[in-house]
Image: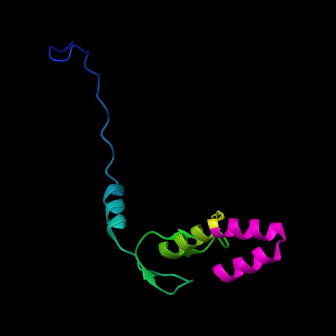
Amino acid sequence: MTAETGRRPVVGGRPPRPDDGRAERMNSTMSEKITRTCPICGQQYTEPPALSRRDNKTDICPTCGMMEALAAMPRREGPAERTRRAVYATGNKWAIENFKATHG
């Protein structure tokens, strides 16, 4: 046992890892900026690409990826749509005319 740790020393120790250059290659690959062109908007970008929701194969720019994601989200009904639905559900012609005149 060693005095400072109170543990038995490991016989042979841990073998050293081979230096095959992987760490250096990964660091250089991650620091390189690859310029791509978005097939949707035609803009060039260097950020990591987004996967298109249209075909699940095409890489697109992050901005178009965000637009596709927002377009795919279900939209909640707003107050004007709720009021329009309620007014039309009554069948009251005066109320419908009044709603059209005030809400365009």
Magenta segment, prevailing SS (helix, strand or loop): helix
User: Which quadrant holds residue 7?
Assistant: top left
Residue sitting at the far front: 94
- Residue 78, position in %: x, y? 63, 66
Q: 49 or 87: nearer the eye?
A: 87
* Residue at x 51% of width, y 87% of height: 42
Q: Can you say whether 18 is above or below 14 in the image?
A: below
Residue 46 located within the stretch drawn in magenta: no
* Residue at x 53% of width, y 76% of height: 64
Specify the quadrant that holds the C terminus. bottom right
> In the rendered image, is residue 61 in sight?
no
Q: Can you say whether 21 is above or below 45 in the image?
A: above
- Residue 84, position in %: x, y? 72, 71
Residue 85 located within the stretch drawn in magenta: yes
User: Which quadrant holds residue 23?
Assistant: bottom left
Q: 53 or 37: nearer the eye?
A: 53
- Residue 73, position in %: x, y? 63, 64
* Residue at x 51% of width, y 81% of height: 38
Q: Which residues are magenta?
A: 80-103
Q: Can you say whether 6 is above or below 70 in the image?
A: above
Specify the quadrant that holds the N terminus. top left
